Image: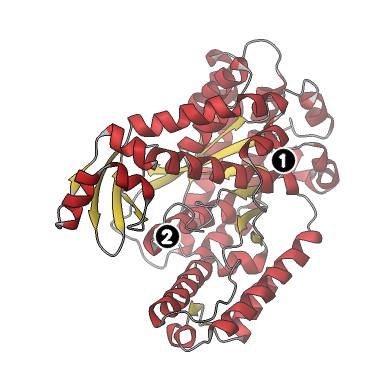
């Protein structure tokens, strides 16, 4: 991805690691189109040369900063900053959708429409500027979006034949969940605005959906149309929300987000990474095996790893911590691999007790070691103590989305050294690198969440 950064620097769009607003605002739309096509071509070329690594991930569009669900730039920046920490500390590479793509020049745009194009391009560059060191080091890579394919076909292709059969009923069930968990009101500006909100995991914050005044469904409610034309804000009943298709809109976005990530994951042989509980809920709804759903639930509750987040360090210093304490990160990855191997390969019921044993015996010692080493490294990098920190940590959870349990995974892992711990594993790391390809995480989703550190 260094070429993408070089393209932007050579065009003076990124100056001193920040986008130049004056440069963007002075550009013609043909110039923007040319740059975007150049980036798309470079991204496509770099993907064809990619060699799979075991701890590689395909991010959901929203976690990747694309603004798929919310275009508000603060929201996008918050998401990409969270992803940056994961990519810098806990992965070999994370693929994110190339949101610098898809623009085609259109003649005869109004001045307001042209300004919107430039503003959107500038906001995309703002997001890119947050991850420049990670793009240059290859920790984050762009991938051009997969072309649209019908949901049922995607379910069958990526989740198995049974998921294709289940899809319609589960999609309707997801729509109903949104309907039962959302509120909305509407008012009129240039367009009809529907202000939608609800509890997590369905909504992180209020989202406004806009439709033109000619939106046909609004004609079903002439009393609402009359009131909003008088300048009033009108709360919507569940029936009115259903008539306007708002619940279906959000369910569609959830399914699109999940399938976009899984399609990229399947294409590149990576795990799927998201920060959305509703993505995981949907994937488990599509799971034909209740045993896998139960196993995933146990793993979420008892095998989640609480890891350093390093919110008080610049991303360049975060990368220094990763390099300096490489052994600690390798040991944690080794323990996580072992926990995943046991989770997937054990036949019969996977119990809460067994998960607690795996956490205590395998994950907890390495998490404590990692935390200790990172604290010392961070202390050396900070020039002076910071009195008021946010005190947040990352939480890494995992589960199966394919519905397949590979009975021989643990034996494969053991044969190549992934069930060994400590210095023996570190010594063997180089010889294991080629054999590492025998283990795959592309049947897995990973959930990356940020939460406040518990007070001690």
Residue at point 48% right, 61% down?
Answer: 380
Could you tell me which secondary element the residue under label 2 belongs to? loop
Q: In the image, residue 309 lies at what x, y percent?
A: 47, 50
The quadrant in which residue 51 appears is bottom right
| Nearer to us in this view, 362 or 58 | 58
Is residue 153 positioned above or below 104 on the image? above
Could you tell me which secondary element the residue under label 1 belongs to? helix
Neighbor class of circle 1 (other Cα within 10 Å; few <14, some 14-19, many 20+) is few
Q: In this view, does 193 lie to the left or right of 97?
A: left
| Nearer to us in this view, 253 or 78 | 253
Q: In the image, residue 279 lies at what x, y percent?
A: 51, 38
| Nearer to us in this view, 392 or 263 | 263
Which image quadrant: the C terminus?
top left
**Residue 251 seen in the current view:** yes
Which image quadrant: the N terminus?
bottom right
Q: Which residue lies furthest to the top in this view?
A: 348
Neighbor class of circle 2 (other Cα within 10 Å; few <14, some 14-19, many 20+) is some
Q: Is residue 44 left or right of residue 139?
A: right
Q: Which residue position is annotated with label 2?
A: 71
Q: Which residue position is annotated with label 1?
A: 423
Q: In the image, residue 248 lies at what x, y percent?
A: 44, 39
Q: Of circles 1 and 2, which is in front?
A: 2
Is residue 69 positioned above or below 98 on the image? above
């Amino acid at each position: 991805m260094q070429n993408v950064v070089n393209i932007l620097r050579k065009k003076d769009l990124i100056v001193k690691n920040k986008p130049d607003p004056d440069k963007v605002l002075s550009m013609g739309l043909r110039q923007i189109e040319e740059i975007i096509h150049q980036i798309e071509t470079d991204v496509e070329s770099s993907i064809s040369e990619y060699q799979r690594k075991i701890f590689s991930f395909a991010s959901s569009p929203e976690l990747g900063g694309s603004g798929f669900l919310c275009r508000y730039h603060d929201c996008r920046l918050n998401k990409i900053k969270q992803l940056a920490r994961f990519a810098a500390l806990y992965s070999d590479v994370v693929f994110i959708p190339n949101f610098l793509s898809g623009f085609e020049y259109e003649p005869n745009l109004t001045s307001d429409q042209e300004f919107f194009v430039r503003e959107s391009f500038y906001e995309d560059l703002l997001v890119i500027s947050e991850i420049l060191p990670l793009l240059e080091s290859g920790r984050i890579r762009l991938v051009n979006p997969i072309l649209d394919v019908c949901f049922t076909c995607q379910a069958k292709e990526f989740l198995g034949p049974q998921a294709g059969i289940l899809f319609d009923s589960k999609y309707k069930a997801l729509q109903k969940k949104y309907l039962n968990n959302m509120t909305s009101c509407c008012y009129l500006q240039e367009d009809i605005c529907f202000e939608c909100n609800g509890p997590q995991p369905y909504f992180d914050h209020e989202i406004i959906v806009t439709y033109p005044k000619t939106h046909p469904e609004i004609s079903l409610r002439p009393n609402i149309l009359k009131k909003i034309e008088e300048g009033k804000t009108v709360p919507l009943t569940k029936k009115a929300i259903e008539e306007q298709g708002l619940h279906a809109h959000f369910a569609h976005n959830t399914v699109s987000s999940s399938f976009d990530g899984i399609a990229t994951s399947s294409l590149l042989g990576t795990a799927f990474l998201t920060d959305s509980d509703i993505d995981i809920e949907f994937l488990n709804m599509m799971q034909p095996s209740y045993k896998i759903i139960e196993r995933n639930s146990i793993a979420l509750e008892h095998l989640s790893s609480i890891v350093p987040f390093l919110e008080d360090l610049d991303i360049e210093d975060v990368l220094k911590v990763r390099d300096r304490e490489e052994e600690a990160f390798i040991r944690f990855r080794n323990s996580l691999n072992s926990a995943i191997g046991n989770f997937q390969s054990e036949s019969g019921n996977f119990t809460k007790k067994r998960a607690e044993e795996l956490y205590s015996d395998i994950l907890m010692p390495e998490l404590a070691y990692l935390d200790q080493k990172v604290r010392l490294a961070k202390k050396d990098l900070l020039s002076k103590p910071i009195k008021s920190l946010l005190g947040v940590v990352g939480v890494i959870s995992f589960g199966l989305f394919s519905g397949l349990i590979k009975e021989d995974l643990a034996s494969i892992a053991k044969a190549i050294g992934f069930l060994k711990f400590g210095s023996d594993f570190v010594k063997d790391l180089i010889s294991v690198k080629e054999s590492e390809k025998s283990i795959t995480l592309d049947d897995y989703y990973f959930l990356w969440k940020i939460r406040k550190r518990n007070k001690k």
